[in-house]
Amino acid sequence: MTENIPILRVNNISKSFGSNTILDSVSVALAKGEIKVLIGPSGGGKSTLLQCINCLVVPDSGEIELENEHIHFSRKQDLYRLRQQVGMIFQDFNLFDHLTALDNITIALRKVKRMNKKEAMQRARLELEQVGLGDKETLYPAQLSGGQKQRLAIARALAMDPKILLLDEPTSALDPTLIGEVIAVIKGLAVKGMTMIMATHQISLIYNLADEILFMENGRIVEQGPPAALLSAGNKSKSQGFCDRLNELSEVEG
Amino acid sequence: MSIALIIPSAVGGVLIGIVAGSIRTFGGSFVRTLADAYAAVFRGTPLVVQLFILYFGLPNIGIYLSPYLAAVIGFTLCSGAYQSEYVRGALLSIKSGQYLGAQALGFTTFQAICWIIVPQAVRRAIHGCGNEIIYLIKYSSLAFIVTCIELTGEGKTIATEYFRFTEVFTIIGLYYLGLVTLAMLILKNIEQRLYVPGFGHN
């Protein structure tokens, strides 16, 4: 399912805040249709890595190439173009609170992609339909449940036709009963061949979707490999231990 | 005359407030210093002094303003300085995630401020800005010190002529009360039009 031509190449990215090194020379390559899952303890650098990939946090050093195009961190136009092509889903949604569900999607289409109003609305309705929010277009974020908010955020990102989707713990801020609907949407994306890199502690996403698991700790990728290898029974990998603990936790939660 | 003073000053003040407030929050260090200095000067000196300088001081460097124009410019600049503070407070109260969300979709900094941050901040600033407009209605009476005769100035003339201060100024007070009530109704209406669930009281 994965061809071996990477569409995204991240080479030796480092980022420090003051004397605190958050990312220490991290490299990732992503092929079309590939899904990589970041796991590991919090503070390990997962969020920062994702935010560096679309330059919401500009790396101190290293290189990013999207479809063989080198991104110059100092050129604002490069950053804007990169972010248009790389969608991002946040843990706490970051929907625009003053706009309806429909306008949350159309505003970026109109202002960033310069689509006309009618086209933008058609596209937005299509995306809302896809995530099962077709009847919610006039509601504001404050009137939606957590799961609906995250599905709207996914629709908003997809409307921009991203080449890659970054997901930063998309289910962590959700009520356990609402996680399922978001997971279903993410699985649907995987079936359609969306290229994704996702930080998550959701065991079903890790087991079922990951082509490769990246285990991050102290700003480095300390283990990586396909789930079958890393998580096979009797393997003493850190990923295995981590997932075992997640499993125990989900069993306790019932 | 009072209304002709108040309306342009209120509108101008709000516009200057939004621009100056945005610059004071997001501007580069040079323009930010300028906008900060503007706010400091106009909030830090009495309006009477500002009006005197505009009307009696500027002719010294060859700028002659009509009493009406001097008053409107004075009120607009002073009101704008106060409004910028309300706007700045509102801008700072917008969660950083809103900006992050816009950036992640490819918005430029200017687009994000223009389409995402300011429309939200306006909804938060509206109560403060309304308050400032009500002040403005009342300090518009200062126009008479630069010989722009409005409600209070007119009243003073009549009162001195007939020597009936209590009656005249009671009626003037009622006029202002009427103007302020009208302004409050208009503001309430704007507030309702801009209402979005999740903003304001909930």
Image (cartoon, helix red, strand yellow):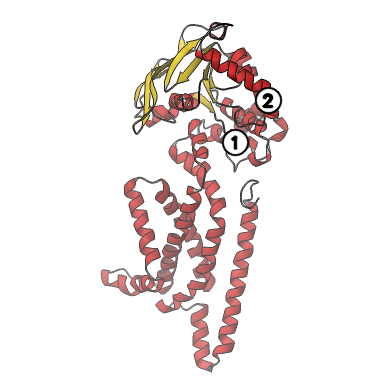
| Residue A176, position as x, y percentages in the image | 67, 28
- Is A163 rendered above or below residue B63? above
The residue labelled by disc 1 is A104
The residue labelled by disc 2 is A253
Residue furthest left as drawn: B61
In which quadrant of the rendered view does residue A209 lie? top right
The residue shown at (51%, 11%) is: A237
| Residue B12, position as x, y percentages in the image | 47, 60
| Residue B53, position as x, y percentages in the image | 33, 71
Q: Secondary structure at mark 2?
A: helix
Whole-angstrom CA distance, mark 2 to mark 1, is 34 Å
Report the front residue among A252 and B75: A252
Q: Secondary structure at mark 1?
A: helix
Residue B6, can we see it?
yes
Q: Amino acid at mark 2?
A: Glu
Report the front residue among B183 and A140: A140
Query: What chain letter is assigned to the residue under label 1?
Result: A
User: Could you classify mark 2 by the number of other residues whose Cα lies within 10 Å: few (under 14), some (14-19), or many (20 or more)?
Assistant: few
Query: What chain letter is assigned to the residue under label 2?
Result: A
Q: Amino acid at mark 1?
A: Asn
Residue A150 horizontal side relative to residue B97, left or right: right
The residue shown at (44%, 31%) is: A56
Report the front residue among B69 and B100: B100
Placement of the N terminus of chain A among the 4 image quadrants = top right
